[in-house]
Image (cartoon, rainbow, N blue to C red):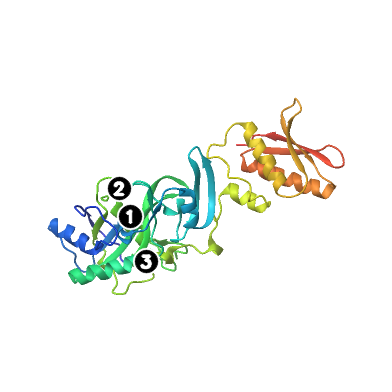
Amino acid sequence: MRSTTSLQVVGITGVGEVGAGDDLAGMLVDALHAQRASLLDGDVLAVSSKVVSKARGLTAPLEDREAVIAAQSVRTVAARRTPTGLASVVQSAAGPVMAAAGVDASNVADGTVLLLPADADAEARALRAGLRERTGADVAVVVTDTAGRAWREGQTDFALGVAGLAVLDDLRGELDASGRPMSVTARAIADEVAATADLVKGKTDGVPAALVRGLADRVSPDDGPGARSLLRPAATDWFRLGHVEAVRAAIGAGAVDAPPVVPGPLAERLARAAEVAQAGGTGRCLVKDDGRGPLLRLSADDAFDLGALAQRALAALWAEDLAGAVERDGARDALVRVSAPPA
């Protein structure tokens, strides 16, 4: 597909506060008309999930935010304790992996939180139909939300729901400029649109939507597969758990309380490692110092259990960014001398 050489991106102002039951499509069209703008065939409207959720009345009491997050989660990817509670990255009921399942306490009524729509693709389809009914224009809709990235600082908007837009430009099998076949390149068009639109939208500026013009060749009459088709299946997800959670799950210690977001002093890290190692099977693991430095003293009923405990202890230390060396100390005892891992 030919690359787009220019885009026009315009923030939609004057929408006003959205409440439960409001006609969001009508509010967006009225705001566009107030800007002396209108929708044309092939336009893309990027709309914040926050106003979609507000129009649907998707709120919950703030009494127990962690319980609300748990109810909106399919599974936990990683969790850390903070001074104000538990911070978690989860696979949300809405589909994507994101912090706190997308539960949002900003710009909402006191004592409440806002939830993501369970089916954002359906919301995008409904909004698209509403816009077509009011304007006659065949446009695409992208419902956007904000998330962090595993390997980079900061957040960016992504497509939570999509209707009428090609979500992926799959170039695998095509030739690059040098004539070599491409094997992995698949551009996430819908996510790129969401991120572009966020440059003119604003969480504090009252600009919940943006008009993106110049992508008519990627807008289709049918609603298309939606944003859910971009979710990576479990079988191809290399990063299904955080590194601490993966270690704990592998050694059978997944029930141990989540670690703090700041690891803390060495004594606390060693205590956690001992708890994790011991929780994963049989035997005892104690933190000691014999004058030569910190160590974990291991004891078990037989050599097999002792060896298994030693391996769990090494794995638990690794999850705390520590290393260890195992020394036998009798038939049913061993020491794990603790050190920092090599750089």
- Left or right of 262: which side holds 256? right
Given the image, on which type of amino acid does mark 2 rest?
A: Lys
Indicate the secondary structure of the residue bearing disc 2: loop
The x, y position of residue 311, in whole percent, is 73, 46
- Left or right of 147: which side holds 129? left
Along the line of sight, which residue is nearer the eye, 313 or 169? 313
| Quadrant of image for the N terminus | bottom left
Along the line of sight, which residue is nearer the eye, 81 or 306? 81
The residue indicated by pointer 3 is: 121
| Quadrant of image for the C terminus | top right
Residue at x 36%, y 68% (from the top left corner): 122
Indicate the secondary structure of the residue bearing disc 3: helix
Extreme-right residue of the structure = 331
Lower position in the chain sequence, tag 2 or tag 1 = 1
The x, y position of residue 53, in whole percent, is 34, 58
Calculate the distance from the C-alpha at mark 3 to the C-alpha at mark 2: 22 Å
Extreme-top residue of the structure = 291
Lower position in the chain sequence, tag 3 or tag 1 = 1
Q: Residues within 10 Å of mark 3 (few under 14, many from 20)?
A: many
Residue 186, quarter of the rendered image: bottom left
The residue indicated by pointer 1 is: 50
Q: Residues within 10 Å of mark 2 (few under 14, many from 20)?
A: few
Indicate the secondary structure of the residue bearing disc 1: helix
Circles 2 and 1 in contact, beta carbons < 8 Å: yes
Calculate the distance from the C-alpha at mark 3 to the C-alpha at mark 1: 15 Å
Lower position in the chain sequence, tag 3 or tag 2 = 3
